[in-house]
Image (spheres, rainbow, N blue to C red):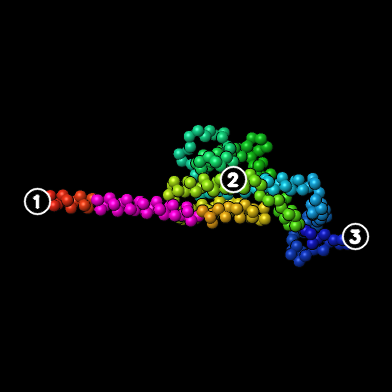
Amino acid sequence: LEHAVAGAGAPAAVPAARAKDSGPRLAAKLTAAPAVSDFRARLNAGDEMLVEEVDRAFRIVMAESVRNAMMGMFQTLEMFPPTPPPLGISDDDCAYEDVTAPLPAVAQRLYNDQARRVSDACGGPGVVQKRAMTAAFLVDFAEAVGYRLPPVPETQSSMLKEISTRIQEELKRRGDSEEVQIRARDAFLGGLGAGAAAEGLKQEAQKWWTDNWRSVAWAAAGMAVVGIAAVATAVLSNRGDDGRRRNRREL
């Protein structure tokens, strides 16, 4: 749209890519072009009210990105909802942001929150998703016009670190294969979304996976080795017992 904004009194110049749009679509873009130019100028000039709205939208996008990443990972790990359900978590307990809790408890609370969203009686189902989509549009616009987005909020940064620790604990406890771990990682990183708004989150999450992936993988491999060693010890022990019994019979 910025290319369609003309100087005062001059006709709007339409780039070749936009000239292929249908008549109504192109007309709508040309109609919106002056407003887009105005908002771009206000935002880059530091308009207090507009900057506040963009920053609020950015926080919403960050919260939704982490939530979507967690939900995708739990679905990949077949923990959405977890089976059996964790004790002490009621159906109206939706405090999934408390990622200091064990991973099954976090998964159940997120599942409860998703169920509440789907059946939201206040404003109708999907109202939270609509708000998130609007926020994402504002953030994308701000990024496109060159506005410097704020850093990752401390809340989401702390959640990433904590949930990463809970993932590590759960993968070790379950002894999942490396394939499952890779799928969980990809689901988590993919759920963070795309664009500059999500890039900071991805960098922090990727750093954890890089720093801790080897320890998680070695833990799973170690459990497998221990299991194999236990089986081998049992087999050798049984063979020894059989040999001693044969010797006694021969005597």
Q: Nearer the viewer, residue 116 or 43?
A: 43
Q: Amino acid at mark 3?
A: Gly
**Residue 233 within the segment the image draws in magenta:** yes
**Residue 243 within the segment the image draws in magenta:** no
The residue drawn where x is 68% and y is 46% is: 59
Distance from the alpha carbon under mark 3 to that under mark 1: 115 Å
Q: Is residue 161 visible?
A: yes
Give the x, y percent position of residue 34. Answer: 83, 55
Numbered disc 1: secondary structure: loop
Q: Nearer the viewer, residue 14 or 179?
A: 179
Q: Is residue 217 left or right of 68 when viewed as pictured?
A: left
Mark earlier in primary sequence (3, 1): 3
Residue range highlighted in magenta:
213-237
Q: Amino acid at mark 1?
A: Leu
Write down the residue under mark 1: 251
Q: Nearer the viewer, residue 131 or 234?
A: 234
Viewer-nearest of discs 2 and 3: 2
The residue drawn where x is 57% and y is 33% is: 92
Within 10 angstroms of label 2, few (less than 14), some, or many (20 or more) residues?
some
Q: Amino acid at mark 2?
A: Met
Q: Is residue 141 visible?
A: no
Viewer-nearest of discs 3 and 1: 1
Main secondary-structure element of the magenta-colored stretch: helix
Distance from the alpha carbon under mark 2 to that under mark 3: 52 Å
Numbered disc 3: secondary structure: loop
Is 127 drawn above or below residue 238 in the view shown? above
Are dots 2 and 3 in contact, CB under 8 Å?
A: no
Write down the residue under mark 3: 9
Within 10 angstroms of label 1, few (less than 14), some, or many (20 or more) residues?
few
Mark earlier in primary sequence (2, 1): 2
Are dots 3 and 1 in contact, CB under 8 Å?
A: no
